[in-house]
Image: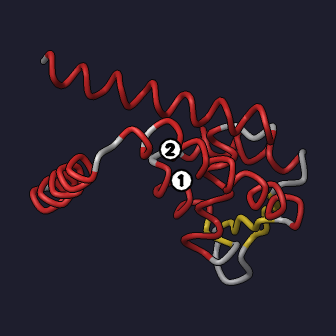
Amino acid sequence: MKLWNMWKGTFKQIFGRVVKEMSEHTGLSEGDFGVLDRLIQFGDGRLRQQELADSMDWDKSRLSHHLTRMEKRGLIMRRPFDADRGVQVIITPVGKSALDEALPIVSKAIRKHFLDQLTDQDRESITELAERTKKRS
């Protein structure tokens, strides 16, 4: 448990620092960034709302409330699909610009608070651990 708690605490601390720097420089929250990044990474700028919820491991209600706030800020828009009852979430030019501004800040913060602290051996060990645990999942 000691090792597990140390691992979780370290991750939370690093993640918190990265999110703080991003938020301070861009005004985006962790959730905003997650939505915008997934729209580009997984859907070329548009995804079904349910696919987005699944990719974020959020329930439909949480995502819907968050998307309402993002829509009011002009970061995304939602459109019903013609063929079925689904909803499509689409990144707007404002949202794409905000993501483009955030990505180098996030990358720099990850490097500063995590990657620069690692030796080559650390990188190898983390990579091996990630691959091994992924295979067992």
Residue 33 in the figure: left or right of residue 15: right
Local SS, label 2: loop
Label 2, on which residue?
A: 58
Q: Nearer the viewer, residue 29 or 66?
A: 29
Looking at the rendered structure, the kind of residue marked 2 is: Trp
Q: CA distance from mark 2 to mark 1?
A: 5 Å
Taking 3 as reference, is 68 left or right? right
Q: Amino acid at mark 1?
A: Ala
Q: Locate residue 98, reporting x and y percent.
A: 81, 54
Name the residue tied to disc 1.
53
Where is residue 66, by image quadrant? Answer: top right
* Vertical placement of residue 75 versus 39, above or below: above
Q: Is 131 positioned to the left or the right of 81 in the image?
A: left
State which quarter of the image contains the C terminus. Answer: bottom left
Q: What residue appears at the point 58 percent right and 62 percent down from the top-left corner?
A: 38
Classify 10 Å Cα crowding around label 2: few (below 14), some (14-19), many (20 and above).
Answer: few
Q: Is residue 9 left or right of residue 70?
A: left
- At horizontal 68% and vertical 57% (from top left) the residue drawn is 36
Residue lying farthest bottom?
Answer: 83
Q: Please report the residue visible at 56 percent of the width from the left and 47 percent of the height from the top.
A: 60
Say whether marks 2 and 1 touch (CB < 8 Å).
yes
